[in-house]
Amino acid sequence: MNEKKLLGREFVILGVGLALGLGLMLGVFALLKKFDLTVLWGGLAGVLLALLNFFLMAVSVWRAADKAEAQDVAGGKRIMQLSMFGRYALLLGALIVGAKSGLMHPVAMLVPLVLVRPILSIGEFFRKTGEKTE
């Protein structure tokens, strides 16, 4: 399976999973009578940040793989390290700004970010038998 098709499939799985997780989270806040617009905006911001982080990670992996194929393994490793630092700095900055602004609930912003790994892991169960990710 080529990289673009695989990324598209994983992106769809992640998007659907995050949408379901957002709906569940909003429902829990509503049941606890803690729902307000800050929860909605925080959840939407968290979903967008999670999708952006995943996309930027995929782009940096492609770039690092290209470097490694060109026999520049150190360059590929450097790209991954810089990417991770940059993505984490972006996430931290966005979370701080969102929480400090008072427009977004901090927990609602964090929940989608925490759900990314479990969603992708669960998505593996739905992969067709014999389907390769390479």
Image (tube, helix red, strand yellow):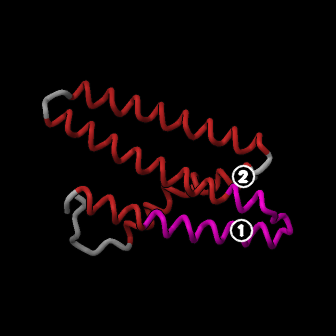
Q: Earlier in the sequence, mark 1 or mark 2?
A: 1
Residue 54 against residue 69 in the figure, above or below: below
Label 2 sits on a secondary structure element that is helix
Q: Which residue is at a point 62% across and 54% down the rendered structure image?
A: 45
Residue 28 lies left or right of residue 123; in this view the side is: right
Q: Is the stretch drawn in magenta largely helix, strand or loop?
A: helix
**Magenta highlight range:** 13-42
Residue 34 on the magenta segment? yes
Residue bearing the label numbered 1 = 26
Marks 1/2 in contact by CB < 8 Å: the verdict is no
Q: In this picture, is 89 found above or below 117? A: above
Residue 133, quarter of the rendered image? bottom left
Q: Amino acid at mark 2?
A: Val
Task: Kindly indicate the quadrant of the structure image that contains residue 10.
Answer: bottom left
C-alpha gap between disc 1 and disc 2: 11 Å
Q: Position of residue 130 (x, y in %)?
A: 21, 71
Q: Report the residue at 37% width, 74% height from top.
A: 126
Residue 101 is situated, as x and y percent measured from the top left of the image, at 77, 43
Kindly state the secondary structure of the residue where label 1 is placed: helix
Decide: few, some or many residues near mark 2? Use Cα within 10 Å; few <14, some 14-19, many ≥20: some
Residue at which label 2 appears: 107
| Camera-side residue of 24 and 11 | 11
- The residue depicted at 79 percent of the width and 71 percent of the height is 30
Give the tally of numbered discs.
Answer: 2
* Mark identifier at residue 99: none
Name the residue nearer the viewer: 33 or 86. Answer: 86
Which quarter of the image is occupied by the C terminus? bottom left
Residue at 31% across, 42% down: 61
Q: Would you identify the image quadrant in which residue 69 lies? A: top left
Amino acid type, label 1 = Leu
